[in-house]
Image (cartoon, rainbow, N blue to C red):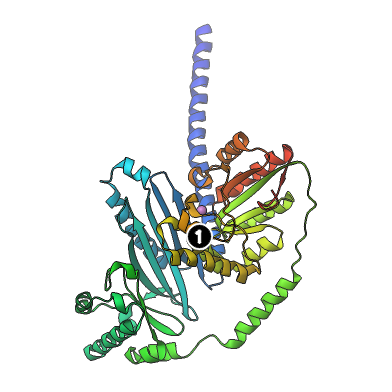
Amino acid sequence: MLKYVKEKIGYIVLMLIGVFCVYFLFHTIFSYNVAHTNSNINKKEAEDKMMEESKYAGVGIATSIEEEKTYRSAIHYPVFESDAINAKINSYLDKAQGEFEKTLEGVNKQSLYNHPANFSLSFTIHQVVDGLYSIVFTEESYKEEDDVKLVGKVFVVDTNKGKFIQVDEILNNDVENRNDLYKVIKNSFLESKYKQYFLQNKWDEWVQQQDFSNMYLTDDSVVFLFDKNELTIGTAGMPEISIPIEQAASFFKKEWKEKLLSGKETEETKVAQDEKKQIEEEDKQVQKEEPSTGKRVALTFDDGPHATYTPEVLDLLKSYNAKATFFLLGSRVDFYPDIVQRIVNEGHEVGNHTWDHRDLTKLGRETIRHEINDTNEAIKKAAGVEPALFRPPYGAMNQRVMEVLDVPEISWTVDTLDWKYRDPEHILSIVKENTHDGSIILMHDIHGTSVEGLKLVLSYLEKEGYEFVTVTDL
Ligand code: NI
């Protein structure tokens, strides 16, 4: 009898273990699928927002920034509705960055600690006609004490058809026509500010290649972009030779001639947009808060604005009646001016974080000035205010940058490393450990995990009795 019961119990235990195993297996697979699908949906939503909120119809901007001890990179790229276009742009980005990283393999680690390697990839966008854009990438890289390398790459994209336009589709194919175009480019070169740097032998080489893949269009010109050292001595940087569309159109196929000489934006729509902006500005009321005597902390958000995450950050701040400071990138402000307007309307402070997050200490005075002034102008155009603060990318400053700068440079005291770990709990633990009265906390409003982290941080610091103020009010 006892033996029988024992056997029975043995069977039951085995069965239970079996059932549990099966359940566990299913649960794991099922929840993995759910989590996986959710993150895909979130990613899709974020990408859709990138385009919806953008000033450029059907094109968003994505930014990825890394700041390691030995290696820094800032990459900005456009995002389109067409997956095929995005795939091709991504493969260009991967290839460019991969090639640079390969050159670092042989480099002494200690030397990289002393001089971090740097890879920057940014772009400008030009609307040619409705739905037709030129994307002009500039790749800037250096390692150790090498010269800065500058390389360009252009894409012409038809967003209506979801495809790239090749130069051969635009240019008339006959040889004579092409030879004439070379003459026009050369004449423009010799009339430009690059004249003194021009190298005839390099020009001869370039003409030999019979390759116009460095050509792009704007709404009123055709532009040829050259790499550093391609046709000139290095100090010339990357020459851009621009030819008015009326002059260049004779080299185009008939269809393109018609397309480019008509269909420009009318003055009327521009005026209407300006008027709308003015009305919005007049509506704006910034309230000044009474100063209090409690503990204060300044939350700061870098590298935005972002179409999805910045509005989420703003919603959260509002629910805690918190004010914060946003250090903006001009290149992103250009895409999302309405979000900048909202930041300012809701009483937050905006600071300048340069145009495209390059290490300013490696740039000449004129370029530094552009990085700062172009960003100021974009912010002013978007929200009617001039940033009164500046935060240098990677915290990198030198005498030259200081001389160009006419507003205070703002660093941080608590680095949440949110961009690196992408972990809300980790953000909270760093904040818990390091925040005091008067702290300046660094976060980035271009990551979903940072928004989640902000929720935890706001709740924790509020309980600790902190008031959230702008850097200026700290
Ligand atoms: Ni930054």
Q: Is residue 439 left or right of residue 256?
A: right
User: Which one is nearer the viewer's eye here, 462 or 325?
Assistant: 325
Q: Quadrant of residue 289?
A: bottom right
Residue at x 64%, y 79% (from the top left corner)? 274
User: Tag 1: residue type?
Assistant: Glu
How far across and down, in percent of the image, does residue 216 sit? 38, 78
How far across and down, in percent of the image, does residue 85 sit? 41, 68
Q: Secondary structure at mark 1?
A: helix
In this rendering, the answer to whether 375 lies above or below 188 is: above
Q: Is residue 22 visible?
A: yes
Residue occupied by mark 1: 403
Q: Quadrant of residue 243?
A: bottom left
In this rendering, the answer to whether 380 lies above or below 300 is: below
Q: Is residue 18 left or right of residue 406?
A: left
In this rendering, the answer to whether 164 lies above or below 88 is: below
Residue at x 42%, y 45% (from the top left corner)? 68
Q: Is residue 52 visible?
A: no
Q: Is mark 1 within 8 Å of ligand 1?
A: no
How far across and down, in percent of the image, does residue 147 sit? 31, 58
